[in-house]
Amino acid sequence: MRIMLMEWANSLPELTEVASRLKKNNHQILYWVRDNSYFKVDEAEFPNTIFHEHVSAREGKSAEGLNLSDFEPLGSDVVSNFFDAESVVLSMMERYYGEKTLQEKKQLFYDLLRYWYGVAVKLKPEVVIFEEMPHHLHSYVAYSVFKFLKIKTIIVNSIYIKDKLLITSDIKFNSLELQSVLRKNFDKDFDFDNLSSDVKANLESGTPVERKPVKIIDFYNERKLKNKYGEGFSFSKILYKIKFFVRLFRWKNLQRYILNRLIGNAKKEYVDMQINPDFGSKYVYVPLHFQPEASTTIFGGIFANQINFIEILSAALPRGWKIYIKDHPVQFYNNGIGYNAFRYKGYYQRISKIKGVEIVPLDTDTYKLLELSQVTATVTGTAAWEAALRLKPALIFGDIWFQDCPSIFKVNSVESCREAFCRINSHDFKIKKQELVNYLSSLEQVTINAILYFFAKPEFFADEATNVNNIYNAIVKSMEQS
């Protein structure tokens, strides 16, 4: 088959072997987008493949040997089919190009659309394989083009369960295989003891999180530097800190740093709005998402603006209930305390004025908030999965891999929220552990034991050859399905 690889083998070297095996088995690798900052691929092993570096692709630069001018500009008859994608991409651009004007951002979107549409028409791929959900500017535009042109897409997606990957065909997490297995297993009762140790660990601990979020960021940056300079580079963390201070003392950054402390900042606004929670009240726990991230920008739709779903919750809230809002623990750690496109001036003030809403301190125990709540609500966040593991109901407003779990209510309007609250408040409502065990057993039947990223490797269950074999076989199986 004629294959394109998107963001493939970005951080894990053995994933290049998956590409090699595809080539050896008479599949043609037409095009390969990847991040070269972790390690280099020997491109000579793929002499007929067009390679495109991740950052160049994101910036709208063409791959070597191709030019934007090679492809005809697209008319409104085509572009009008991508208005939803344009809205998403304009939001995504805030992460990298916040200083660009609206028209500059639109032009970049049109250039990306023209380029990837032209590439797809020129190369005629039969299948496109994504290592991860398409959450970069170029990969999301390319994905939108492939879907429009009805080109088969395979997305190898990591889930919250350790060493488990779920293959889907789109960003709506419509795993036809999982849905088929869930239907087949509808009237079966599976034994808890037959679940894998990793799945049982999730269920018993009530959370998939093994490291503190801040530590994950430090670990990620340190690991990236070690990949670049070698395992023996013992000062990677020091180098990371030096780079941080170099960025800080650039004039614009220093100016912003001073102003944040003199005239106010997002964190101060949050603290000014916060109220200590009354755990004796009935409430919905709403942990805000860290932004910008794919969890809202890609999978949240209109709810990437989190105020939208909070206002819907408020309008549907049962009488006497409250909504407790707590921001993500790394929001200010990663983005700084200043105002930005996602935590702009007046953001928390607007939230605090919504009927029934109270903002709680950042250091409030998230698990206590979850345990004592009547419902957890989020766009697609981990907290909803943690609620499900605790046999507590959760509302989600976006698309996420666990959306078919029996304790999850997928909502998108005041009416659907009211219906969910009515069901949860009914006397006969109870989530049974057996239902969750059945769901997890079905999930295990369709997931594969493998990893995609370097930070999962220290605790990985198997060797590199097994990892490659499992991923390769799953991809081939997906390619063969209609």
Image (cartoon, rainbow, N blue to C red):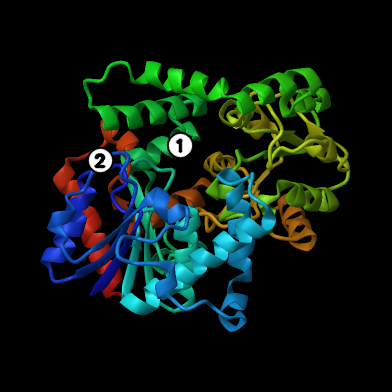
Given residues 237 and 277, the one toward you in this image is 237
- Give the numbered dot on residue 39: 2
Q: Residue furthest bottom?
A: 77
- Give the numbered dot on residue 12: none
**Residue 303 locus on image (x, y percent):** 68, 53
Position above or below: 464 against 149: above
Q: Is residue 278 visible?
A: no
Looking at the rendered structure, the kind of residue marked 1 is: Pro
Neighbour tally class for label 2: few under 14, some 14-19, many 20 plus, Cα within 10 Å: some
Q: To which quarter of the image does residue 274 belong?
A: top right
Quarter the C terminus occupies: bottom left
**Residue 439 locus on image (x, y percent):** 45, 54
Position above or below: 273 against 70: above
Q: Is residue 152 visible?
A: yes
Q: Which residue is mark 1?
A: 208
Q: Earlier in the sequence, mark 1 or mark 2?
A: 2
- Name which residue lies at 72% across and 56% down: 420
Q: To which quarter of the image does residue 387 belong?
A: top right
Looking at the rendered structure, the kind of residue marked 2 is: Phe
**Residue 223 locus on image (x, y percent):** 33, 29
Quarter the N terminus occupies: bottom left
- Tell me if 56 is positioned left or right of 269 in this view: left
Position above or below: 344 against 154: above
Neighbour tally class for label 1: few under 14, some 14-19, many 20 plus, Cα within 10 Å: many
- Name which residue lies at 82% across and 37% down: 346
